[in-house]
Image: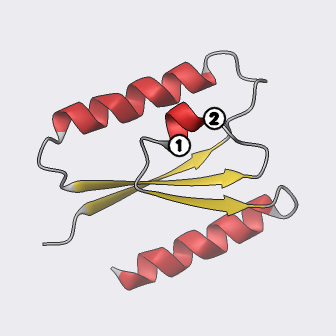
Amino acid sequence: MNPLRITFLLSLTDQWAGGLSYYENLLRAIRLADPEKQVALIGILTSDAGHAGVLSMLDEVYELPPSDFREKAMSKIAGWMRQY
């Protein structure tokens, strides 16, 4: 059985004061609720990210450049959705 894949569009900048804590707590809660690892956590982020704590909790990380972020992210997500 393939794991459920949950994708997050991450903005890991210092402009959102609680953002890193929010993502860390959310990802940690999902991991604790899923001891059998039936959920794959995927992160799509811009190149301005580099926070190892959050990134280490993800199963897959895809980095997109900041320019045209929305268009590229939506295209990538649409491609993934067609696979399942």
Left or right: 81 as drawn, with respect to 34: right
| Quadrant of the rendered image containing residue 3 | bottom left
CB atoms of marks 2 and 1 within 8 Å: yes
Quadrant where the C terminus sits is bottom left
Which amino acid type corresponds to the residue marked 2 in the rendered image?
Answer: His
Q: Which residue is drawn at 79% across and 24% down?
A: 15
Element under disc 2: loop
Checking the image for residue 2, the label placed there is: none
Q: Position of residue 27 (x, y in %)?
A: 39, 35
In this picture, residue 70 sits left or right of residue 42: right
Q: Name the residue under label 1.
A: 55
Task: Indicate whether 53 appears above or below 38.
Answer: above
Specify the color scheme: secondary structure
Hey, what amino acid is under mark 1?
Leu
Point 43% across, 75% down: residue: 81
Residue 59 appears at what percent x and percent y? 40, 55
Relative to 55, say whether 61 is above or below: below
Marks counted in the figure total 2
Task: Assign a secondary structure to mark 1.
Answer: helix
Which residue has dot 2 on it? Answer: 51
Q: Which of 68 and 49 is in front in this view?
A: 49
Residue 4 appears at what percent x and percent y?
A: 26, 61
Q: Foreground residue, 57 or 76?
A: 57
